[in-house]
Amino acid sequence: MRQRIRVIAICIIRRDDEILVFEGYDHVKDETFYRPLGGGIEFGENSLDALRREFREEINAELKNVHYLQTLENVFQVYGNPGHEVIFIYTGELADPTLYEKEVMVGFEDNGDRFKALWMPLDNFRSGRYPLYPTGLLELLEK
């Protein structure tokens, strides 16, 4: 498997002291983890356009009031494999206010796999009860 740096864009969407996150499970680590929604930037696409496309594709949602926050670099292990990402982090809002009323949303990856998106209290990450990725994101949100 060819190793490469993956460039992605994610968006922090808040509902009071909660953020909208994707729930993943790493069977190698036996760990349930969370990451804000977003995804890969395609060749020739800027990070903001990629972010908007990913939200449309994954949960059929439009974004508004989107603002660039910061870029993080993350080197990690997932599913027993090394990973390396450069992450453009944005803040924003869901254009459809009814999405804030849903506790759980079903999302779809490019390959058709389903995932669960949910509102997670920041206290769950602050306490260390659940991991929030990318590494350093919680500290950035606490600034």
Image: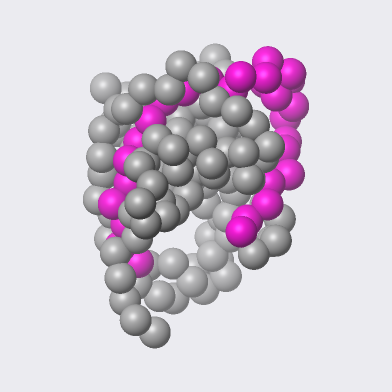
Q: Which residue is nearer to you in this view: 107 or 26?
A: 107
Q: Position of residue 140 (x, y in %)?
A: 29, 31
The residue at 54%/65% (across/down) is: 26
Q: Which image quadrant is residue 112 in?
A: bottom right
Judge left or right: residue 102 versus residue 40. right
Q: Position of residue 61 (x, y in %)?
A: 64, 32
Q: Is residue 76 visible?
A: no
Q: Position of residue 30 (x, y in %)?
A: 55, 66
Outermost residue, front direction?
44
Q: Is residue 107 magenta?
A: yes
Q: Quadrant of the C terminus?
A: top left
Q: Is residue 97 visible?
A: yes
The residue at 62%/39% (across/down) is: 56
Q: Is residue 76 magenta?
A: no
Q: Which residue is nearer to you in this view: 86 or 32?
A: 86
Outermost residue, bottom direction?
1
The residue at 51%/35% (across/down) is: 52
- Total numbered badges shown on the rendered structure: 0
Judge left or right: residue 126 versus residue 22. left
The residue at 47%/49% (across/down) is: 39
Region rendered in magenta: 83-110
Q: Quadrant of the N terminus?
A: bottom left
The main secondary structure of the magenta stretch is strand
Coloration mode = one colour
2 lies above or below 32: below
Q: Position of residue 49 (x, y in %)?
A: 44, 38
